[in-house]
Every structure is written in C-alpha cells, then in structure tokens.
Amino acid sequence: MDELVCFKAYDIRGEVGVSLTSEIAFRIGRAYGEWLSPQRVVVGCDARLSSPRLKRALCCGLMESGAEVIDIGMCGTEEVYFATRHLAADGGIQITASHNPAKYNGMKLVREDARPVHSDNGLQRIKALVQENAFPPSERVGNYLQHDTRPDWVAHLLSYLKTPPARPLRIVVNAGNGAAGPALDALEQGLRSRGVQVEFLRLNHQPDGTFPSGVPNPMLVQNRAVTQEAVLCHQADFGVAWDGDFDRCFFFDERGEFIESYYLVGLFAELFLQTFSGSTILLDPRLTWNTLETVNRHRGKAIISRTGHAFIKARMREENAIYGGEMSGHHYFRDFGYCDSGMIPLLLMMQILGQAPRPLSALVKHAQARYPVSGEINLTVISPEATLRAIADHYASQGGSRSDIDGLSIDFPHWRFNLRASNTEPLLRVNLETRASTGLLAEKTDELLRLIALYQPTEGTQ
C-alpha cells in the first residue's frame, strides 16, 4: 500500500477493489478509533453495491478499536450528520461516493456534533495511521447496534415547514436510484400525517447500486431531461433531483426548466431573512451579485466564504449564520447543526410555493434576468495554478476588483468571474455573471475561455 490515493481534501473516495478495498476500510475504522478515541460512532451507507461490505469492514475496525458502532442502515449523508448529533455520538461515518459512477465508493467522516473531518484537522493523521498499519492490541471490542433514527430525522425536517401549503402541491422527485427513495417515502408519510396535501411523482425511485439510469449527478446536462419531461407531463408545480447520497438537490420550475442553484440561494436567503431579520447568510465566491443584493435588501449580513463544506460549516459556526448556500447544490442550516441537507430545501420550496400565488419560474425570473450566468464550465488543464496566475496578470491592468478568497475572482462594473481549481477533481472551474446582458455574458465567456486556452492548453472540457 504505497500510496493511499483514496484520501482526498474533504473525504475518502476511490475505485472499489483498486484504491479502496475492504482491508483499507477496516484500517480506516481502526485509524479513526485510534485518532479520536470515540466511545460511540454512527455509521451509515448509500445504495452502492459495494457499500454493505465496506461498511462491515469499517465497523469491524471501529469495534476493534473499542468503539460502539450504531448502524443506521442505508441512508443519506445528512442522516448520519443528524444521528451523530441526535444520539450525542462521538463521531459518524457515511459510506458513499456521492455522484460518482458505480465502481467508486468512499467515506465522509465527522466527529462530535457532526463537525467535519478533513485534511486540515485530522484526515491526514488518519491516512498516516492507515499507512503505518501498526495499531496497538485491542483492550476491548466495542458493541454493534442497529438503530433507526429516520422517524426523528423526519420530525426535525418537518419543523422547517412553518405553515402548511395553502394549496395541494404536485412534485416530481427524482431519486436517481440512490438512497433518496426510501427517505422520500418516509417524508411523504410524515407530511400527510400532518394534513399536508402533497403528491410525490416518483422517478428512478428504487435504490439500485448499478445506477441503471446513469450516474446520480443532476448537474450533468444529459441527466436533466427525464425530470424536465416528467414535470411537463404531470403538470407538476416543480421538480427536484438528488445525487446518490442526497446531500445536494437541484430544482426544476413548472415549465421543466433547470434552475441554477445560485438563484435558489437568493430565494432561500430571502425566506430566512423575512422571518429572522438581520441574520447572517453565507455564500461562496463563484457567483455573488444576486445573493449580495438580496441579503442587503432584506437588511441581513452577507459573508463570502471559501467554497467547500468544511470551510462553509466552520465559518457558519463562527458567524452563527442561519443559512449558507453554494451554487453546487449544497444548502446549510444553523438548526441542522450547520450541516448541509438535500431534503430541507424541498420543504422550504413547499413553504414558499404553498403561500405564493405565483409559480416558481416567476419567483426567480427577476434574478435570472438581472444577473445572467454562464453555468459552471469545467476544464481539464495541465496546470490550474499556472493558468490562474496568467489570467490574473492579464486582467490586472483593467481596473477590476480582485479577491483570492477561493481561486481567483475579479469584479468589473458590469461583469465578473471566478476561476478555481477543484478540491476533488483535476479540473479548473469557470463561472461568470453579468448585469442584465446576455450578450455581454456570451462575449466575456468566450473571451475568458480563449484566454485560458491561450495561456494553458486544455486537454478537454466537461
């Protein structure tokens, strides 16, 4: 085991049987126990075919380290976050590879109070212990328990629906054959028990680790058509699609149009500020103008944070922010332990549309027209950092306002862009927005892409 390439910046992820094996999973359990010395650890897994055996190996490693394992079964990552806090456990681990293809798997680790474990606060130490594989003899073996926290999780989710919708809602829900299907069934039952008139129109609902309908990644354009068509066919109020472990969600309006998560961040920020005036809202630096305007208009406090769940969660705790949103489809909530949830946004949208006389398309139309965006463009380049330096030098003399909070952001009076290297993939991510001019957007997007190709030859685009 010369190099543990499955250890990434925020989590563990690798090809099953190649860079991630049952032996490695066992060692991760032992290393996590050696590093944290937990008494109780919550463990869950997604719907991948490899998840049960990796979970068994992980649990054996944890128990051999002396920890008691609380297995909550197949679930979403947010359910591990919830159970870790709800059961006052010392940590939690979810077996998942999120939106990656079926041959991959991984782990997301947290400690007490669902605080994330990442490269800067423990993941590198765990990696070193796995590499050394020199664990002390076990003084005792921990117990293994199974526990169903889903009813309590559903009860917590329902607290976000402050007022039942004043009209029946028809919602297309696309689970992507991931872990979201059974969770949605439980949520729908909870809604109906409270008299909420809602109909879930199910797509790819049954968990299937082979992902017969394609990788569970709704951000891919080719994966959107099935949800779009279902919304139109069923004349639904809106549609939602989730990734494999449902910590990210993506919305479609009543016309079947995909809504960039950027505009949803502004919509949810407005909802929270209407109730909790003056609260703090976090956003990432990729796209900012609409959210900043919305928060300022409602007299809130907006803070731009470095992209990535570990950074967002830490800053939210520091600022006691009520809500944080990323354009990648992650939404964070103070009352959810500052963690991200892919299901709470569904309930927030039900809250908004259940009271509003206008459809979803009308609620985001102004923001879309005022601040058109390029959508995230992913480029595979030979040297992302060299590219960032070259682009910064090119625009240095043009009078823009530069920020290095995360990658490179430069704001001009009528357009802005952000370039950043991915923390999880070998990609350069490109985002642009303008002020009420799709023509300027096309012009500047083309200009920036040509400069990237000039300064750093690309190997391909995604």
Image: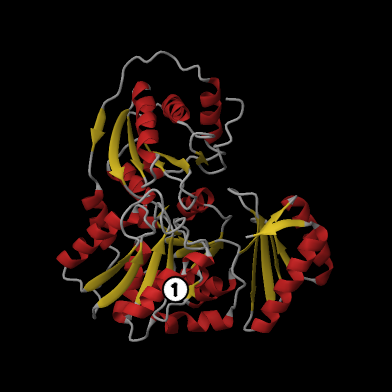
- In front: 309, or 63? 63
Name the side, left or right, on which 343 lies relative to 7. left
Task: Give the answer, above or below, for where 241 lies relative to 65.
Answer: below
Among the 4 quarters of the image, the one containing residue 230: bottom left
Query: Where residue 260 sits in the image (x, y, percent)?
Result: 51, 71
The image shows residue 328 at horizontal and vertical percentages of 52, 61
Place of residue 330 in the rendered image (x, y in percent of width and height, measured from the top left): 46, 59
The single residue placed furthest to the bottom in the displayed view is: 357
Type of amino acid under label 1: Leu
x and y, in percent, of residue 382 in the image: 75, 50
The number of discs equals: 1
Residue 183 vs residue 406, the one in the foreground: 183
Residue 183 seen in the figure: yes
> What crowding class fits label 1: few (fewer than 14 Cα within 10 Å), some (14-19), or many (20 or more)?
many
Q: Nearer the viewer, residue 329 or 297?
A: 329
User: Would residue 150 appear left or right of 410 to someone viewing this image?
Assistant: left
Can you tell which quarter of the image residue 277 is in? Answer: bottom left
Q: In which image quadrant can residue 92 be found? A: top left
Picture residue at 53% right of the left edge, 71% below the top = 291
Give the residue displayed 81% in from the left and 71% down from the top: 398
Whether residue 260 is situated above or below residue 97 in the rendered picture: below
- State whether residue 277 appears in this view: no
Q: Secondary structure at mark 1?
A: helix
Q: Work out whether 69 lies above or below 170.
A: above
- Pick the quarter of the image with the N terminus: top right
Q: Which residue is mark 1?
A: 267
